[in-house]
Image: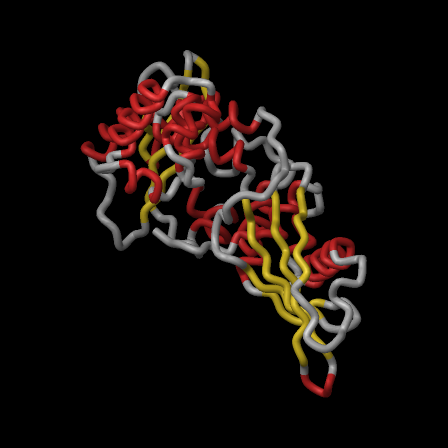
């Protein structure tokens, strides 16, 4: 329905509306324990909401402004246990959900639940913090000579918002009209990272690069530049990229494409450029075995040859 949702705006609103409530018993929604898990997998809108639903603040302050008008609730189970619920909404301008949609979601639910289970396995692992490839495009933060935030785009705000949430900062701190608490938080983070004078004003200083590795597993690559500002005052421009460790990327593509651990390891190595023979020697396997792995990877990733396999974007 939408892309580029401003999480730093809407998540605090949702949190305020549901503060202190059991997520399984949100206002104007039927408590999850009253839904019949044995009868069906997908619930229609009228089956998981209460009669006063459209008079609730949750609907009028959150769902309605986002045009989330008609919904289904998908019940997710893995290995005989309830994993969670997946709400799916459409706007009033879209085609209403029909029986085909419900049948499709009923068939898809076990696979979604399996994905959640796999994600929990990944999150439970410990990974090294060496930087890998960017997860998405960079954000930009501009600071003045006193270390105050002059400007920040939505991408950078989203990156730091994730960190702040993991540090248990109050949701309400990011609901202020001018986002002053968020700006102060980002300024403090950046001053702590660039605390060794790399961004001191001078003629044409080289960019300073730093890795911010958060305990929650989020890794940001920060590249700072000094640029002249108005009135002869220098400004500090910091590019912010979220990156992922190679081990996490390897685990992610293994689950994403249904690869064996050795196949995922080989795919990561192929993308770095060595020959199949060199990889075989490094892994301590025979060259024919390595070629078998390559054939399996070409088939599983749906590419035509080794060159395309090397160039394949791992998503």
- The residue located at (59%, 57%) in the rendering is 240
The percent coordinates of residue 268 (x first, y second) are 44, 34
Is residue 313 shown left or right of residue 171? Answer: left
Dividing the picture into quarters, in which one does residue 72 lie? top left
* Nearer to us in this view, 135 or 283: 283
User: In the rendered view, would you say 149 is above or below 216?
Assistant: below
Q: Most extreme residue toward the left, as rendered?
A: 100
Is residue 215 shown left or right of residue 286? Answer: right
The percent coordinates of residue 99 (x first, y second) are 20, 32
- The residue located at (63%, 38%) in the rendering is 129
The image's colouring method is secondary structure
Is residue 7 shown left or right of residue 217? Answer: left
Numbered-mark total:
0
Does residue 120 appear in the picture of this structure? yes
Is residue 55 shown left or right of residue 97? Answer: right
The percent coordinates of residue 88 (x first, y second) are 36, 39
- The residue located at (31%, 24%) in the rendering is 291
- The residue located at (55%, 32%) in the rendering is 23
The percent coordinates of residue 124 (x first, y second) are 58, 24
* Nearer to us in this view, 104 or 48: 104
* Nearer to us in this view, 233 or 21: 233
Q: Most extreme residue toward the bottom, as rendered?
A: 231
Does residue 41 appear in the picture of this structure? no
* Nearer to us in this view, 109 or 205: 205
Q: Most extreme residue toward the top, as rendered?
A: 80
Dividing the picture into quarters, in which one does residue 315 lie? top left
């Amino acid at each position: 329905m939408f892309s580029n949702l401003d999480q730093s705006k809407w998540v605090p609103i949702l949190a305020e509306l549901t503060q202190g409530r059991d997520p399984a018993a949100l206002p104007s929604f039927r408590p999850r324990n009253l839904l019949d898990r044995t009868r069906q997998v997908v619930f229609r809108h009228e089956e998981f909401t209460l009669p006063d639903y459209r008079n609730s603040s949750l609907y009028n302050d959150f769902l309605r402004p986002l045009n989330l008008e008609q919904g289904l609730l998908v019940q997710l189970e893995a290995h005989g246990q309830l994993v969670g619920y997946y709400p799916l909404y459409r706007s009033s301008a879209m085609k209403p959900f029909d029986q085909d949609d419900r049948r499709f979601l009923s068939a898809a639910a076990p696979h979604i639940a399996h994905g959640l289970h796999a994600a929990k396995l990944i999150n439970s692992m410990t990974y090294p913090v060496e930087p890998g490839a960017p997860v998405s495009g960079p954000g930009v933060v501009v600071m003045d000579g006193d270390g105050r935030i002059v400007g920040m785009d939505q991408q950078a705000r989203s990156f730091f918002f994730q960190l702040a949430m993991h540090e248990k900062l109050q949701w309400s701190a990011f609901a202020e009209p001018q986002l002053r608490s968020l700006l102060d938080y980002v300024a403090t983070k950046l001053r702590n990272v660039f605390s060794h004078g790399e961004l001191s004003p001078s003629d044409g200083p080289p960019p300073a690069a730093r890795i911010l590795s958060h305990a929650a597993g989020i890794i940001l690559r920060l590249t700072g530049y000094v640029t002249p500002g108005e009135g002869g005052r220098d400004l500090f421009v910091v590019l912010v990229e979220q990156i992922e460790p190679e081990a996490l990327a390897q685990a992610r593509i293994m689950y994403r494409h249904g690869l064996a651990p050795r196949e995922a390891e080989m795919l990561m190595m192929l993308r770095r450029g060595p020959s199949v023979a060199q990889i075989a020697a490094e892994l301590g396997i025979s060259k024919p075995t390595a070629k078998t792995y390559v054939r399996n990877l070409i088939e599983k990733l749906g590419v035509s040859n080794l060159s395309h396999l090397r160039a394949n974007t791992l998503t």
